Image (cartoon, helix red, strand yellow):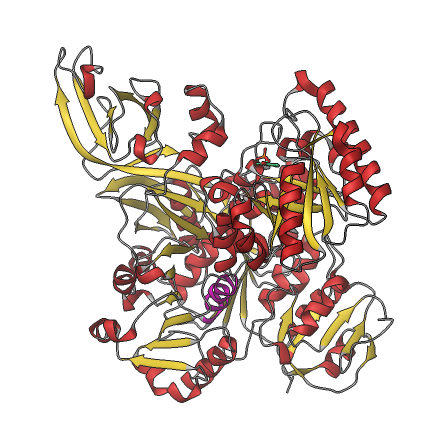
Amino acid sequence: MLSTSYTIRSIAQILHAEELIVTDGAITTLLTDSRRISNAAEGLFFALSNRRDGHEFILEAYEAGVRNFVVSHKPSSPLINANYLVVGDVLKALQQLAAHHRQQFDLQVIGVTGSNGKTIVKEWLYQLMVPEKSIVRSPKSYNSQIGVPLSVWKIGAEHNLGIFEAGISTVNEMERLEQIIRPDIGVLTHIGSAHDEGFANRTEKVQEKLKLFKHCKQLIGYYDELVGYKSQLEHLQLFTWSRSFREADLHVFSETIISKNYYLRAHYNGREIEALIPFLDQASVENAIICWATMLAMGYEPEVIDNRLERLVPVSMRLELKNGINECSIIDDSYNSDIQSLEIALNFLDQQNQHSKKTLILSDIFQSGLRDEELYRQVSVMLGNRVSRFIGVGEALAKQADLFNVPEKRFFHDTHDLLAHFNELQFNEETVLLKGARNFEFEKISHALVQKAHETVMEINLNALLNNLNFYKSLLKPGVKMMAMVKAFSYGSGTFEVANILQYHKVDYLAVAYIDEGIALRQAGITLPLMVLNPEPAAFDKLVEYHLQPEIYSFGLLDHFLKYLQQNDIVNYPVHIKIDTGMHRLGFETSEVESLCEILEQNQLIKVVSVLSHLVASDAEQHDAFTMKQIQRFEKACKQIEETLKYQFIRHIANTSGVTRWPVAHFDMVRIGIGLYGIDAAVTDPNALQPIATLKTSISQVKHVKAGETIGYNRNGSLSKGGRIATVRIGYADGYLRAFGNGIGCMLVKGRLVKTVGNIAMDMCMIDVSEIDVKEGDEVIVFNDELRIEELARQIGTIPYEILTNISQRVKRVYFYE
Ligand SMILES: *Cc1c(COP(=O)(O)O)cnc(C)c1O
C-alpha cells in the first residue's frame, strides 16, 4: 500500500533534496507564510521568494516553533535542532511534493478553470454534491502556483471527490498546475477577457487554459467558445451547453423569471428538462448552468439536480468584523463551517490585537468524511493556543468535549440552548469568532452580540486596503520602508481595525496626528513604532509611557522635550525631525538647520531616528519645479544633519502622490495616506487601486409631492412637475455636508443616480425618486466603487480627503475580509 504519512526524511527522498536532518519527524502541514504558522511541530516551511526572499522569514517561522525548512541554499549557520532540505527551486519543490501526494490517491478530481466564476463554480459544485460525496476542495480562491499545491495537499484517504481551481496569468503556467491537480473531469467556466495582458492574443490564452485538460476524460464547457477548438480536444468526451446551438449537449431554449427565481428549460438527451435557479444576475445564472451541465455529465438525474440547484446559496466567503456589546469585537462567519474555512477564520482572528481574550463559538461540522473523533481532534490541534475560550454548539461537539485543551470551555446542545444561557457567558472586552453551519442559525447569536446599528453604515473592505498597500509596495525599491498614515481614524476608515492589518502585513511605521490617537492604538495592541505629528507638551508623560515617537518641528518644542527628558532621566529617546522645505506649516526652516545641528551635536537625550519634510503639491504638474526644489532643499538639510550626528537616520518626504509621481523622492521611507484608502489621481491603471469604503443608508419614507409644493427646510426644494421623493437616513451630522443639497449631490438607488432635493438636514435628507420604483427600507448608496468619493468631492468643490474624514463616528463601520 502507498503511504500518505510523511516524515522529513521521506520528503527529502521524494524531492531528491540534499538533506541536513538532525532528527526525523512527522510532517503534516505545509507552510509558506511565516505570519500564518499553525501546527508548527509538524510543519514544513518553504522559503519561497516573491517580492522578498523567503529565507528572510526562516527565523520568524523558527521562533513560532517550526523546525523543518525547504531552502535553496545551505544555511551558513544552521539553527539549533532545525532540519533543512536544500533544493534547486523551492517553489518547484512545493509543487513536486503536492504532485507526489496527488498520485497516492485515486479519487475522482474535477479541475476548474476559466476567466471568471472559478471560485463560485467550485463552491457550488461542492454545495450540490456534498450530500453523497466526501469532497476536498481549494480553500477560498487558492488557484495560483502556490495555492494549488497547498490545496492538493489537503487530499486525504477519506475523500472520494476533489474539486480544485486553477488560475493562470501568463503562458507556461498551466502545465505545472495540471501535473499537480491531474483532473479526470475538466470544467471551463468562461473565457472572457480578464487577465488578457499576460497573453499575446485570445487564442494563446485559450490554448494555455486548455492544457489543464490534457489528461481529462471529460470536459464540460460553453459550446460557443469551445467549438473552434474541437480538433484539439479529440482525446476527451466533450459535454457542452449553449443558448443558441442545438448541437450542444445541454441546449437552453427558454429563460423566464418566476418570483425572484430564474426558470430555465433545456433540451438534453432527446428530452426536455428544467431548472430553477435562485439568482437573477447573468453571471450567477451562467455559473449555475455550468454546474448543471457538469452534474449531467457526471450522470446525475436531472430531477435531482433541479432539486439541488433550487437551494443554492450565494458564495460569500467574506468575514465581517463588527463592534459588539460590552466593547467586544465580533467576527461573523456563518457562511459555512468546514475545517478549511475554520483555518481561514482563525487566521483573521490571529490578526486581531485589540483584546487579549479570544473566544471561538463553533457549531458541529458536517460532511467532513471523517469520524467525529478524528475530525474534532484535528480541530483541537488547529486551535492550539489561538483561543482562550471555546464554546461548542451541537451534540457531536459536546461528545468530544475532552479533546479540547482550552483554558475555558462550554458546550451547548444547540443555538437555542446557548441563547438561554447567554448572560452567564458574560461577553466582555473580547474578540468573538462565530463559526456555524447554516442550520445552526448563528445569526441569532450574532444578533445578540452585535451592537444595534443606526442604519447608515460605512463598509470597509480590508482586502482592498491590502491590495492598495501591496500596490505601493510594488513601486518601492527593495529596502525602502513604508510609514502608513493612520491619523484622523485612518482617514475615517477605522482605528485598530486598519492598524491590525497594516501591522500584520509588516508596514514599518505608523503615524498619527495626536498623542491620544497613538494611545488608542497602543491600547488596542498595536506594537509598531508610532510617530506623532503634533505632540502636545502637556501629554509628554503619556507619550513616553506608550512608547510614542514625537515629530520635533521647532526649537520651542525641542526645548520642552529635552527639559522633560532631563527631568525624567531619560536618554536616547527616539524622535523625528521635521524640516520645512516650503509648506510653511510645521518644521525647522532650512536656514535654522545649522543652529539645530549645534543643539543636536553631542546630545545624548534624544536619538534622531528620522528626518522628514512634506511636499506641498506632489500631485500637481504645474508645481513640479517647486517640488523638485523641495526635494533638493531636503537632501541638503539631511546632509548637514548627517555630518553633525555621525549616525544614520531614515530620510522621508514622499506622501502618496510623491510615491507615484516622484521616484527620486522615495529616499529611505515613504509615507502613504490617501492611497491606502484607494484614492490617488496620479495612478492611471483603473484596476491598480481599489476604493476601500462604501457608505450606505436606507429609505425611511416615500412621499408623493405635487408641483408647487416645497420640500425641506426654508422651502428650498421642489419638483417642477411633481413626483416622488424618498427621505433617507443621512444628514450633515453624519458627514453628508449641506453643500450636497438642492440637486448638487447624487446617490445611487437600484443602480441609478438620483439627485438630492431641498436642503440637507442634520440627520436626513430627501432624494428625487420619481423615476424609480422604491419602498421604505431600500438601500441607498452614498459612495462606493462606482459612485466614487472623487466624484462627490468634485460636486461640492472639495478634495476626497475632506469627504472621507468627515464621515462622523456616529456612522457604524463594518469591516470585511475575504
Ligand atoms: C497626512 C500626511 C501624509 C499623507 O499624505 P497623503 O497625501 O494622504 O498620502 C504624509 N505626511 C504628512 C506629514 C502628513 O501629514
* Residue 760 place in picture, x, y as percent: 27, 25
In the foreground, 364 or 601: 601
Ligand 1 lies in which image quarter? top right
Region rendered in magenta: 339-352
- In the picture, measured across the screen, residue 477 lies left or right of residue 242, that is right
The part of the image, by quadrant, that contains residue 725 is top left
Is residue 350 found inside the magenta-colored segment of the image? yes
Q: Residue at x 59, y 66 (%)?
A: 36
- In the picture, measured across the screen, residue 16 lies left or right of residue 336, that is right
In the foreground, 477 or 224: 477
Name the quarter where the N terminus is drawn: bottom right
* Residue 516 place in picture, x, y as percent: 48, 49
* Residue 298 place in picture, x, y as percent: 45, 62
The part of the image, by quadrant, that contains residue 292 is bottom left
The part of the image, by quadrant, that contains residue 795 is top left
Q: Residue at x 14, y 12 (%)?
A: 707
